[in-house]
Every structure is written in C-alpha cells, then in structure tokens.
Image (cartoon, rainbow, N blue to C red):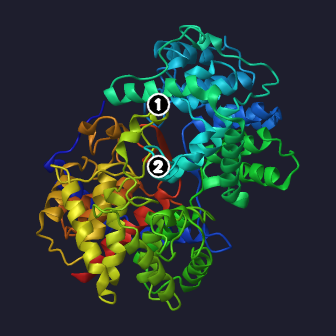
Amino acid sequence: MFTDTNTQTSIHHAASSSTAIHSNIYDLDKAISRAQNKLLSLQDERGYWVFELEADCTIPSEYIMMMHYIGEIDIDLQAKIANYLRTHQVEDGGFPLFTGGAGDISCSVKVYFALKMAGDSPEDAHMIRLRSFILGQGGAAKANVFTRIALAIFEQLPWRAVPYIPVEIMLLPKWFPFHLDKVSYWSRAVMVPLFILCTLKAKAKNPNQVNILELFVVHPDQEQNYFAKDTLLKKVFLGLDKLGLMTEPLIPKAMRALAIKKAKDWIVERLNGEDGLGCIFPAMVNAYEVLLLLGVPADDEQVVTARKAIDKLLVIKDNEAYCQPCVSPVWDTGLSLLALQEAEKAGFIDSRNHAYGWLKSVQLSDEPGDWRIVKPELPGGGWAFQYANPHYPDVDDTAVVAFAMACADLPGLEESTYRASQWIAGMQSSNGGYGAFDIDNNHYYLNQIPFADHGALLDDPTADVTARCIMLLAKLVDKHAHYQPVIDRAVEYLRGEQEADGSWFGRWGTNYIYGTWSVLLGLEQTQLPKTDPLFTKAAAYLKSKQRGDGGWGEDNFTYHDKSFSGKYRNSTCFQTAWALLGLMAAGEAHSAEVKAGIGFLLRSQQQDGIWNDPGFTAPGFPRVFYLKYHGYDKFFPLWALARYRNELNKA
C-alpha cells in the first residue's frame, strides 16, 4: 500500500541538495517572509484567524437528509452539495473517511441516500458502483448505529435495528453504570437529543418518499444481525438492551414526561445561540429536530437560531458546497500566533495585539461548564475550540493559547495566562494525563454498549493533550512553583505512554508523527536533559521515518493498522513541519535530517507563500471520523522554517 523510499544515503543527498538550494536559489528569509505575509493577510478584521474545517462526505449528506426530514428543500444548495459528494467517490465505488482511504459503508450509505434524494437515478453509473460497494460490504444493515438511527427515522428499517436509548436515561442516578457524566462532552451533546428522537420514534417528512431498500441484502424486517456480539460484555449489554425494550410499556407516563422535560431543559440550557449545541454539527441538527418534534413553532426564536447555527457551518462555492463539522477559530488563532512569534518575536505588534485582544474577549471564566461536575471548586479560565462554547472549554486549545501568550512579550496578557494555567493544572486526571474536555473520563466498559459501536464514547487522557499542558505549565513554573508536581506526574504519564519505537500515539492529529512532535515540544520546556530516552528514542523514531525527498508523511490508516506508523504515499508539508519542530526540540537542529526537511519545505512552497496539501491528516475520532484543517499548510511550515532560522542564528 505504501512505498518506503527512505535510505540514509538519500537523506544525506537531500540534505546536500537542500543546502545548495538554500544558499543559491531559495532564500530562507524570503520563504519565511512570503509565508508570514500570506498568513497575516488572512487575519479576520475582528482579530482572529479561522480556516475551513472539512470532514468526510457524511456531514454534507446529513445536511441534505436534514432538509428532507423537515420537508424544506433548497434545490440549488442541494445540487451544489450533490456536486461536492460526487467528486469524492473512490475506486472501490464507495466513499472514504479520509483522503486515500477505502470506502466506508456507513458514509457510503448516507451518501447514496442523499444523492438519491438530490435526484440521482439508481441507474446512474456512479450510483450502480456505490450500490455494488455497499452490498458487497453486507448491505446497509451493516452500517454503524448513527446511520441506522437516521434510517429508522426515515422508516428505512425498523426501530429494533437501533439501540434502546430511552429518554429515561436522564433520570438515572450517578452511581448507575451508565450516566451522562461518564461519557465525553461530544457524546453527551449528541446523545441527549437522540434520547428524545428515538424514544418518540421521530418520523422524517421525506416529501419525495425516497427509499433505499435496494441497499439491503436481507429485507430490513427480516434482518437479525444488527448488533455485534463479539465479546461477552457486548452480549450482556445486548441482553440488557432487549430487556429494556420488553419493559418499556411499563414505564409510567409521568416518568416519561419528566424525563423528556429534563432532556429538553438540558438541551435548551446548552443551545448556545448561533454557535449551536456543543458547536458540533450532529448535536446541532439533533437539537433542531428535537425542538420541532416537541412542537416548538418553526418561527420560534430558539428554532430559528438553532437553524442559523447549522447554516453558518456551510461552505458555499460557485458550483459546490459542503458543511463543516464545526469551526476552529481559537485553535487556528493560537497556532498562527505561535508561528508568527517564531518568525519575528518583536514583530507584527498590531496584528498580534488585535488577535490577543479577541482571545481575551472569549476567554471563559465563571460559566456553568460541564467540567465543573468533577471540579466544582476550580475557577474557570479556559478557551473553547470555537467562537463560543461556554459549557465545553477545550484543554488543548487553552494550553496552546496560554503558551502563545506566555511567549508573546506583550503587555496585558499575564492575568489571562495565569487564569488559564490555573485551570489547566486543575484539569489533570488521576493518572497524570489530560483529556480534551473532562477529567478521568475513562469508564472503558461503556465502549461495549450497543450504542458505542463507533468506539468514541469517552474522553480519556492522551499524550498529545498532556504534552501541551506540560508545555504551558513548565513555561510558567519559575513563577508558579506549585505547578511542578503537576508537571512531574504528567511527564511520568508520558514516559509510560511512549511506544517501543520511541513515538507517541496522536489522538488529535495523524498520528505518531503528530503525537511525537507534540510530546517533544512539551518536554523541551522542562528541565529534562536531551539525553533522556524520552528525547533520544523519539528523535531516532522521527529520523527513521523520513522519506527520500526529505519530508515526512503519515496516513490515517495508522489508526487501523499501527504497522503503517510514519508511512504515507507522499510527504506532506505540515507533517514535515511537525517532524522538524520535534527534532529541533530534541536538540537535532543541525542534523542532516533537519536540513533535508527544510529543503523539502523550501522546494514545496508555492509563490503565494503557502503549501496546499490536499490530505486529511487529523482524526475527529480514530477509525470513525477524520478532518482536514485548511490552516495547517499556512502556519505549521512557517513555524518550522522560522524555528530553523532561529536555531542557525544561535550558532
């Protein structure tokens, strides 16, 4: 599947070539200048940076399905989304979860349904290929739980094909094996509206009565194998699921009404204006449909605002359109600032002050975030990933933004930095690591319940988030000595998480290159010597994965098969930047590998100052949902080039 072109000879040749290119053709300063000028030109007038965030074809398909659910279809928009969808079909006939991936049955089923809704004939060549792929995978009955719920709502399969998730779950006590507080923020935000939709057995209007019975190997009414039974625990949970269905008629009406009210109140409290429930598309759509299902008028302010939140995620172009899963202004702004500050520490004062002013305006404080369930006494101070998401500040974003502030050498940032670092210090899990939004969100047995076939129910600690928390706290520990025990526990967590080959798993970026870069940048801020195996083994891993062209690249297939760690069809600019930044953090700035990597970036830069990598190299949820950050080719290579120049200037 992949070709490994790396040899030590080719790396040294690339290093030699890049040195010649550096000195005679490509000027490092000019490359940095082009990149920083381009990045500065993309700053919003309100101070932040935000770039498109693209997912696979599932979400654009769901947008079309949403229009058919409510019976209000924008024909022109639907046509543009259909144009976008058709361009992403792959050789096997299906639709993949990431660039270069094989077709995925769940994504493919939704795309087929959406295209048929948009008017594509089942006899069109692309639809025949798509149908053949789906049937070859066992048919639509083999799609994941979220897809089967959507099909049940559209009356394409019976409700027994989906897990029993009654709204009465809202009334369960905290000691019960399943409770909302035991799953991740994204699971809570998606599940609570689904409780209502599934309990009341919502029915889509489906005005054109589109059906996809041709996608089932066995008629949906006769299908018996909707749920996996490959572990004893799954069999137990499936038995409990069936028991719940049998006893549902015994649930008192008053109890059901109370549970629906509690679920609705939970949703309404978190509707979050035009930023939407959880700021994530699936939760936002579910909430919108729930409000309509419960009889809230379509012109009610809550319903109108909920729909605006969804539509703000659309990216509409001349001939095609797609829907983003969410938006990333805080993340994009923090990383842009770090790149610009590396490029010119005392420069871009007005732009940086403008950006930091915006960041300060959206820093959270005393809002009733869900993280307070575990730490009610911990003062707020974090940032969300999006424009506004007060119930769910993001640990990773907070660490990045506060670290940028701590490195900025600008006035007026100390209080924000301190509040953020205090919050970060308090969000540490008991094993020393950090999750993205929650503390000790590690009830792993819940991944065996029928609803959790996507395997992304929890927000357990990860190496990449933990590393950025270390990066921030270690930067500030001289002034705040009480952070040292927190740092020490986090370092020991990372020591235990290091793979045998020296790498770290990357939860929020692809994959071992991303995880290793993240950890090395965090450890660089500590007093740990560069001779420690955490550094030396990681540097050796990165060097071993360099390609013959001097770059690095890694495929999302690594989340499915670890043996592909560090391998890809081609080098990518931002994974090359990650590897270079990691190596320089490990003290390898003057190595042949770093010189070769810099040469790759210089040769790959476009005249407009950016690099334009097409691939999806970030997981929303490994093995289930992947992302393309359109800003990664704009700030990460700039950061790496500038860091390299700064290292050369130290010599």
CB within 8 Å, label 2 to label 1: no
Q: Quadrant of the N terminus?
A: top left
Q: Does the image show residue 618?
A: yes
Considering only vertical position in the picture, is 367 above or below 157?
A: below
Expressed as whole percent of the image width and height from the top left, the position of residue 563 reads: 23, 37
Under mark 1, the amino acid is Pro
Considering only vertical position in the picture, is 373 above or below 190?
A: below
**Residue at position x 49%, y 61% from top?**
634
Count of numbered circles on the image = 2
Considering only vertical position in the picture, is 108 above or below 507?
A: above
Q: Which residue is mark 1?
A: 450
Label placed on residue 216:
none
**Residue at position x 49%, y 73% from top?**
337
Q: Quadrant of the C terminus?
A: bottom left
Q: Which residue is mark 2?
A: 183
**Residue at position x 65%, y 69% from top?**
44
Tell me if mark 2 has few (under 14), some (14-19) or many (20+) residues whose alpha carbon lies within 10 angstroms of its own.
Answer: many
Q: Nearer the viewer, residue 277 or 25?
A: 277
Between the residue at mark 2 and the residue at mark 1, the CA separation in whole angstroms equals: 14 Å
